[in-house]
């Protein structure tokens, strides 16, 4: 059993009909698999790439599956193709809320690059979003935080509904956060300020002035918002209803990123640095085009 799990708690959500449908979608066009294909697998880390080489060396039947955000799993020596694909998908789903889909089955690459960026969907309708639970899991409507923009104007996170929101919790005291910022900056520049995708970077455990000064010193152009934290080590943020919420309820570690659709519903969540932010551009374009109905 081989599996890579994202470092946050997620429930097991497997619906047989969806699994079967996705399996057939991703098996419509195949090409011979080779070891170098591991370098082309989207979102996965080096451990996943190394595991793909191991996967190719085991007996049939075998399946290597992946999910947006970097989760992966593989199983081999199966009795038949259908059961080994289903087994690998179930293992992968234990570590992510995102749908797991086959990348390779036996000696064939079955990955469909055109379908891949659509996997954050299907997106909630307005009525479904209104009924959604408030929280941070996929399908939840994210907590309505009370924040301020860079000019100091008070606002609510819900004021940004109507646009896709990339919500990023970070701090200058966090080495991983600092390491990630240049690539996040490049993605923001590539999207452009006129797009329907809004970046909201909120500092944690330090004041806004500290975060803003660091970004300026690094010549980064990113939309910083004030989380309301006033002192070093402060752990509470404010909700729009006046109540406080601990930053650990929002993120078990930093940096943490959420993507919210146009109704404020979580479609993607990731704890830790994201490798290859540019790979998420097609996903952001998809949620921009298809959510908010």
Image (tube, rainbow, N blue to C red):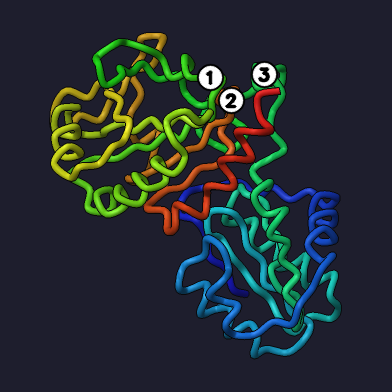
Q: Earlier in the sequence, mark 1 or mark 3?
A: 3
Q: Is residue 174 left or right of residue 19?
A: left
Q: Residue at x 29, y 29 (%)?
A: 224
Q: Earlier in the sequence, mark 2 or mark 1?
A: 1
Q: Secondary structure at mark 3?
A: helix
- Which x, y percent locates residue 74? 65, 73
For discs 2 and 3, the disc positioned in front in the rendered view: 2
- Which x, y percent locates residue 27? 82, 66
Q: Quadrant of the C terminus?
A: top right
Q: Residue at x 77, y 69 (%)?
A: 85
Hey, which quadrant is residue 40 in on the image?
Answer: bottom right
Q: Is 3 located above or below residue 282 in the figure?
A: below
Of the numbered discs in the image, which one, if any, rests on residue 262?
2
Q: Residues within 10 Å of mark 1 (few under 14, many from 20)?
A: some
Q: Secondary structure at mark 1?
A: loop
Q: Is residue 21 left or right of residue 283?
A: right
Q: Residues within 10 Å of mark 2 (few under 14, many from 20)?
A: many
Hey, which quadrant is residue 247 in on the image?
Answer: top left
Confirm or deny contact between disc 2 and disc 3 (CB under 8 A). no
Residue linked to disc 1: 161
Residue linked to disc 3: 131
Q: CA distance from mark 2 to mark 1?
A: 5 Å
- Which x, y percent locates residue 202? 31, 31
Confirm or deny contact between disc 1 and disc 3 (CB under 8 A). no
Q: Residue at x 56, y 33 (%)?
A: 266
Confirm or deny contact between disc 2 and disc 1 (CB under 8 A). yes
- Which x, y percent locates residue 217? 13, 41
Q: CA distance from mark 2 to mark 3?
A: 15 Å
């Amino acid at each position: 059993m081989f599996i890579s799990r994202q470092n946050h708690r997620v429930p097991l959500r497997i619906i047989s009909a969806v699994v079967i449908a996705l399996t057939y979608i991703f098996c419509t066009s195949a090409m011979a698999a080779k070891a170098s294909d591991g370098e082309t697998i989207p979102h996965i880390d080096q451990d996943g790439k190394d595991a793909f080489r191991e996967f190719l060396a085991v007996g049939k039947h075998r399946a290597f599956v992946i999910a947006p955000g970097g989760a992966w799993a593989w199983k081999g020596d199966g009795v038949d193709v259908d059961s080994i694909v289903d087994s690998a998908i179930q293992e992968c789903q234990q570590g992510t809320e995102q749908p797991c889909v086959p990348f390779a089955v036996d000696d064939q690459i079955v990955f469909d690059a055109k379908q891949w960026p659509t996997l954050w969907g299907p997106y909630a309708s307005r009525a479904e979003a209104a009924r959604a639970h408030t929280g941070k899991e996929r399908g939840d409507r994210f907590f309505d935080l009370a924040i301020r923009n860079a000019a100091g104007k008070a606002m609510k996170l819900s004021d940004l509904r109507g646009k896709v929101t990339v919500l990023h919790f970070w701090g200058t005291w966090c080495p991983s956060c600092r390491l990630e910022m240049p690539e996040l900056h490049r993605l923001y520049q590539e999207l452009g300020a006129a797009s329907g995708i809004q970046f909201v970077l909120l500092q944690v455990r330090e004041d806004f002035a500290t975060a803003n000064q660091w970004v300026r010193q690094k010549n980064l152009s990113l939309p910083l918002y004030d989380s309301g934290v006033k002192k070093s080590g402060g752990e509470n943020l404010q909700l729009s209803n006046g109540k406080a919420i601990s930053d650990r309820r929002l993120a078990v570690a930093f940096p943490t990123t959420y993507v919210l659709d146009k109704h404020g519903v979580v479609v993607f969540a990731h704890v830790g640095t994201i490798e290859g932010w540019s790979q998420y551009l097609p996903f952001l374009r998809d949620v921009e085009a298809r959510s908010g109905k």
